[in-house]
Every structure is written in C-alpha cells, then in structure tokens.
Amino acid sequence: MTARLIDGKKIAYDLRSEISARVARLKSHHNLTPGLAVVLVGEDSASKVYVRNKGIATKEAGMNSLEFRLPANTAQDTLLDKIRALNEDPDVNGILVQFPVPDQISQHAVIDTISPEKDVDGLHPINAGRLASGHLTGAGAALAPCTPQGCVILARTAVGDLAGAHAVVVGRSNLVGKPVAQILLGENCTVSIAHSRTRDLRGLCRSADVLVAAVGIAEMVKGDWVRPGACVIDVGINRLPAPEKGLNDAGQLRTKLVGDVAFDEAVEVAGHITPVPGGVGPMTIACLLQNTIIAACRQAGIEETF
Ligand code: NAD
C-alpha cells in the first residue's frame, strides 16, 4: 500500500482563506479588526524567522500585527510588565510570547501572566484546564494550542469522523502531546498517550488507527510500527545533515528537515500520512490566526463560530 499524502499546505491555505473572509466580515459588520501582539526576547535566529512569518500571515489575513522585540538581557519583571500592558490594550486581542525565552525568565511566569482570554497559544493553566474538562466551544471555552488543533484538523480532513478510533499520541509535552490527546478525546477517540517510559511502544503504535508522533527524535517511528491503513500525523521537525545535497556557500554540509516518523517506510504501510515539511507545520500559523479571531470575537461579545 502507498499512503495518501495529507497536504498540510493546501488545508492550511483553505483555512487561512476562510479566516481572511471572516476578518473582512468582522471589519464591515462590526468595525472590528483583530490584533495579534507577538513578543520576542533575544536574538534566536529560528525564533526571529517564526515571529516574522507570524507577522506576515497576520497582515495577510487582514488583521493588525504588533511586534515587540526586547533584548536578550531583559529582566523578567520588564517582560511581565509588557505583557500586563498588552493585557489591558483594547487593540490587542491575542498575545504570544515566542519561546524559548532567555534563562533569567521563567516560562511559567510568562504563561501565567498572559490573560487567558488573550492566550492564543493556549498554554495558560486556565485554558489547559478548560481543554481538559472538555469545554471546547462557546463562551468561556478553551483557547486550544495551535499545533495540536492543526494535527486534529489534518486527521479529520483525511479520514472524516474520528469517533471510536484508537488514537496513539507519542509524546506528553504540554505544548503538543497532552493537548492533542485532549482534543482527540473531544473527537470521541479512544486515546493512549505514550512516552519515553512506555513499554512495547512499537506494539502500542501498531494498534493505532490514528498515530500522532510528537517526540523530537528524527525518524524514530519505523514503518513496522504503523498499522496498515492507519492515519499518521508527524509533528516532529528535526534537522539532519544531508551529504547528498552537497555544501552551502559557507562550505558547510547542507541539511534537510525530517519528522519523527521514518517517512519512506511508513508511507508504504499507512493509509494517510503527513509529509515533513508541508504537513503539520503550515497548520500551526493558520490555527494561531483562528484563535486570534475567536479571542477577538469573545472580547467584543460577537458570536463567531468556526
Ligand atoms: P518535547 O521535547 O517537549 O516533548 C517530547 C516528548 O516525547 C516528551 O513528552 C517525551 O516523554 C517523549 N519522548 C522522548 N523520547 C521518547 C522515546 N524514546 N519514546 C517515546 N517518547 C519519547 O517536544 P515537543 O515540544 O512536544 O515537540 C515534539 C516535536 O514536535 C519536536 O520535533 C518539535 O520540533 C515538533 N514541533 C513541531 C511543531 C510544528 O508546528 N510542526 C510545533 C511544536 C513542536
């Protein structure tokens, strides 16, 4: 069997088009332009690229993008004061602090300071709690983390109704593993969460109808871990040397991105599979924009459902 590719770029493009149309409606019907503030502390080059891309996508959707860059030696109190000011700013509907933050700043303190209503990354304990208690839609519902939402949209688009499916999530981080498991539970899947201490990981993965790999270990999930016909969602982004691509202008070996799934093997077994790149990655920004609209509507008391 050769799996069907789940085209994250196309699915994200469609979602972003829908988001742009909704932003246009909010402007014309309610005189509301949602605003997303992104805060970057320090000079991490990957983070700079992520922040720039988020800004571009926000503007493309017709929303206001505010970007704040603070130096690497910023004191925690200075950052928390900035977040509190953004919490109070009526033009800002969503706040995202790009992680990682420098060592002198506690990630927990940052997450706890962002107003849950503006927490478009969905990491605040109030949002994690609402997600865990199954409060997923309507007033006061969770703002759910973006990458996990993207994973589930991809799985649903590929295989339709997920009710009753056995979903195995490999990884239990607060950013990906745990929230994706909660959202799959909300889709009425039977969910197993696996991690570094799980016994017979291969056997568990082979029992999955939907297999989500969020580990951060290049190509860990092999083809014979995949049940024939399963839907495989690969969250991993790992950079490996690619000698076959030769050297770059600086004389260094070029690199390539691979996921947590050994794609060439798994594609022969799975029914559907996400590529890396071009699978889960593009969905993250699309879901961030979606969360920003949801936050803006709730703050303005406008009923706007997705
Ligand atoms: P993390 O390091 O916080 O968590 C990894 C999890 O994998 C841990 O819960 C750990 O228990 C588990 N794990 C580690 N070794 C294992 C093993 N041998 N067997 C089973 N489980 C094991 O990572 P994260 O933030 O959850 O990210 C996971 C991957 O997803 C990374 O590659 C990251 O780059 C990627 N990611 C991608 C996106 C995206 O937009 N596509 C977003 C976030 C993260």
Image (cartoon, rainbow, N blue to C red):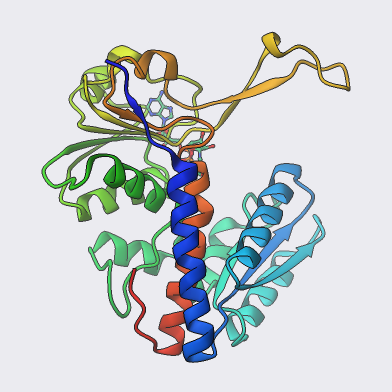
**What residue sits 79% from the left and 63% below the top?**
70
Q: Quadrant of residue 67?
A: bottom right
Which quadrant is home to the C terminus? bottom left
Image location of residue 29, percent across then percent down:
47, 89
* Looking at the image, residue 290 lies above or below residue 302: above
**What residue sits 46% from the left and 37% below the top?**
279
Q: In the picture provided, is 213 more to the left or to the right than 54?
A: left
* Residue that extends furthest to the top in the rendered view of this protein: 244
Image location of residue 238, percent across then percent down:
57, 28
* Looking at the image, residue 188 lies above or below residue 266: below
Q: Quadrant of residue 299?
A: bottom left
* Along the viewing direction, whichever of 81 and 63 lies nearer the viewer: 63
| Residue 120 at least partly seen | no
Q: Quadrant of residue 66?
A: bottom right
**What residue sits 30% from the left and 67% below the top?**
130
Q: In the picture provided, is 70 more to the left or to the right than 133?
A: right
| Residue 293 at least partly seen | yes
**What residue sits 42% from the left and 43% below the top?**
173
Which quadrant is home to the N terminus? top left
Image location of residue 303, percent across then percent down:
34, 83
